[in-house]
Amino acid sequence: MGRAFVYVILGGGVAAGYAALEFTRRGISHGELCIISEEPVPPYERPALSKGFLLPEAPSRLPSFHTCVGANEEKLTPKWYKEHGIELVLGTRVKSVDVRRKTILTGSGETITYKILVIATGARALKLEEFGVKGSDSENVCYLRNLADANRLVNLVQSCPGGNAVVIGGGYIGMECAASLVINRVNVTMVFPEEHCMARLFTPKIASYYEEFYKSKGVNFVKGTILSSFDIDPNGKVTAVNLRDGSCLPADMVVVGIGIRPNTSLFEGQLTLEKGGIKVNGKMQSSNSSVYAVGDVAAFPVKLFGDSRRLEHVDSARKTARHAVAAIMEASKAVEFDYLPFFYSRVFTLSWQFYGDNIGDVVHFGDFSGGTFGAYWVSNGQLVGSFLEGGTKEEYEAIAKATRLKPAVEDVAELERQGLVFALTASQKPPPSPPREVAGSSIVVDRPIYAFHATAGVLLAASIAAFAYWYGRKRRRW
């Protein structure tokens, strides 16, 4: 026996929760929507796992961070799904999907059919074994991608107070976990092959600020080398981390954050793939018209830059999910997704936001000694990216708006001198009006055609006057 639904969301991450909320707001009926997830709980805000969940005092626990509290919206608890007639198929692995037949086969052998499928399968953490290093199954080696990983990490932290942790990787997970471990009074050493942390986004100057701040909190950095092997005791526990440069680090626990890989295996050979994910159009629709993809697994067109991107961040997951559901429920009103890439992080007392693209020439500004500072990226004479640390709500909004407007930059020295003032000023300017084409002509004008308006007004007035005169004479004849 199987079950049939109008809509099925495959995956139980952030995007699934925001898609479910959008479906209810657009009027789906009870029993039409189903969410299938390998996790045993409904969708939750994953960023909490590397932040509040790891705090030693008053840590975040479910149900406090179910979606969609991260966007200051409703908290979608199990009760909420029941009240809205949404079927949760949790703790369930999907064995195969046939997009032509619109069927899903679960690991237990059940067949679930759909009319519209939303793929929200997200991504999985890359494992050390994929790089030729054994030891992921050691009891004190952790990854951080889901609730089970987070619980395991908390247990390890509590079992080795004052111990030594080695964090492999200098990206998002590495930086945020390192901060949380320090707050738990664990000694932390970070290891990564790049010249500086957050190498995919930070400039060397920006990275230097954060590395120095982390050092002031007791974090050690070992850069330019990678893990080669573990020393493992007879109980299967890692006791030391061996690096390719020959050094050896004592370890009571190891946290690995070396990237992710989109979960596309169920759809290979069935849907068009791009940039490691599922290729979709501006409505988040895949190469099969009944299948949509959202979140980390989706490669979608970014209108602002004229190419496709697959973005690994919670903001993209939330917004692509909402947009896909809007396109599904009101296809006749669907518009192209117009997204401004956005990344942020909050660690210790620090808080930064980035908008746009980090290509072209970099212009730094502000107080790198501990105040508000940032950077602009300029490409082809236009602002294309903005970064800001320590800003106010209004200042973050200003750099976002300025980046979307892509104002011209004629003098980078002047841009550096103005700093944040440039974004504050640019964000106050109204967006340029699109050029208007005169019917029947190849002439394109970029300002109102006042002479045409005046002429048309005179002709209209004259016509009304003539009609009034004729009508008056006719009534007198009656």
Image (tube, helix red, strand yellow):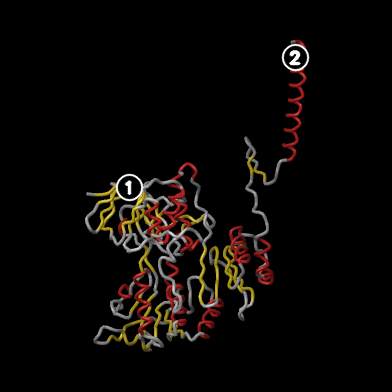
Could you tell me the amino acid type at mark 1?
A: Phe
Residue 311 in picture, x, y percent from top left: 45, 62
Q: Nearer the viewer, residue 60 or 273?
A: 60
Q: Which residue is mark 2?
A: 475
In this orientation, does residue 152 appear? yes
Q: Which residue is mark 1?
A: 5
Give how far apart the Cα atoms at labels 1 and 2 are.
Answer: 67 Å
Quarter of the image where the C terminus is located: top right
Bin the neighbour count of mark 2 within 10 Å (Cα to Cα): few under 14, some 14-19, many 20 and up: few
Residue 407 in picture, x, y percent from top left: 64, 60
Residue found at x 62% / y 77%: 371
In this orientation, does residue 288 appear? no
Could you tell me the amino acid type at mark 2?
A: Arg
Q: From the viewer's perspective, is residue 269 above or below residue 445? A: below
Residue found at x 52% / y 63%: 342
Q: From the viewer's perspective, is residue 110 above or below residue 52? A: above
Helix or strand or loop: what does disc 2 sit on? helix
**Residue 54, image quadrant:** bottom left
Q: From the viewer's perspective, is residue 464 above or below residue 22? A: above
Q: Along the polypeptide, which appears first: circle 1 or circle 2?
A: 1
